[in-house]
Amino acid sequence: MNFAAGWKEFGVPPGRGDSWTNCEPEWRWPSVRSTTLPAKILAVMEEGTALVNTHTPGPPVTSDKGNDRRILRIGHRGAAGHAPENTLAAIRKGIALGVDFVELDIQRSRDGRLVLLHDERVDRTTNGTGRVSGLTWEELQLLDAGDEERIPSLEAALAAASGHAGVMLEAKTPGTGPAIYAAVQAAAFSGPVVYASFLHAEILEIRRIDPLARTLALMEVVPPSGAVLARKAEATLVGLAHDSATGELVATLHDAGLEVWLYTVNEPTLISRAISIGANGVISDYPERVGKSWPGFGG
Ligand code: G3P
Ligand code: CA
């Protein structure tokens, strides 16, 4: 993908290329949204609740014009189908494959360093043993995370992606949301940033710090009303397990002004289904398959 061109789709013109939250105010997401979209009122039928979506997220990052529809291609854990997950190698592979975003899992070491790792323990993905939160940065650096890759710090991951792809940063543990946000600011990351978590308190805290941040509420199962949950988290996007998403649910979330990204979609037929039910973004270990699955995909 031509990243500079891609930025136009995110509302940031090439040349003004700056961090999503650092760029000039008129190009920041919510300022566009507040001038172009009125607040929507959604009747959430399942709960019989009237929902006022106060976080109406402006023009979608995808466009939906027949075959020109643009689906975001998001590399899961970098590009976990091709390189050891959540490593710099996986991030670089995702970039080489033309992702729009790399999705990364963030935790904190015993001595407070933000690092990339999915599980609570290092056992599955490294040659070590123990909880991430029980090991220091120095101890984590002794481990092989696969193919002799090290567990990267969030700072190193941001540096690897900056200027090449957006980042979807998933806060895996309580209390890390604001620290992740601060790390992005300190890094002056160049590209779009989406803050995500199943722990909605984390993204809500980020919303409190930065009303303009783009946040994504992850949901493991289909909730009675995903829109209500997302609203409580004041999120701008929702992430759903692909096998629990339906066209009806996606449409309901769209009507509430929320974009929908589906995870983790690897099989081509399932990628096609995800797109056909209206996903704005597809998170995949094999992100290159997302482009191939849809006629007219402009990646
Ligand atoms: O971000 C979507 C997906 O990564 C969430 O599931 O378990 O792979 O972190 P998991
Ligand atoms: Ca994840």
Image: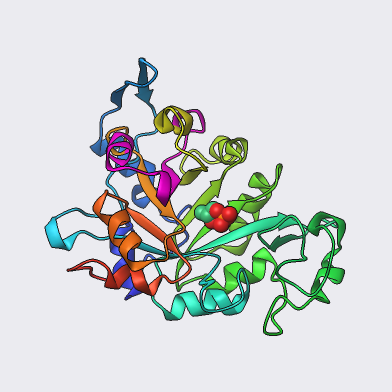
From the viewer's side, name the closer residue of 163 and 261: 261
Residue name at image x 35 percent, y 52 percent: 27
When asked about the image quadrant of residue 270, the answer is bottom left
Toward the bottom, the furthest residue is 148
Q: Is residue 140 above or below residue 186?
A: below
Question: Which corner quadrant of the image does residue 237 belong to?
Answer: top left
Location of residue 269 in the rendering, given as x and y in whole percent from the top left corner: 31, 64
**Residue at the image point whose x is 77% and y is 59% from the top:** 121
* Magenta stretch in the rendered image: 231-253
Asked if residue 213 can be seen in this view, the reply is no
Q: Quadrant of the C terminus?
A: bottom left
Q: Position of residue 194 (x, y in %)?
A: 48, 52
Compared to 113, does 40 lie above or below? above
In magenta stretch: residue 183: no
Q: Quick check: 220 above or below 286?
A: above
Quadrant location of ligand 1? bottom right
Residue at 32 percent across and 32 percent down: it is 256
Q: Position of residue 212 (x, y in %)?
A: 46, 42
Camera-nearest residue between 17 and 99: 99
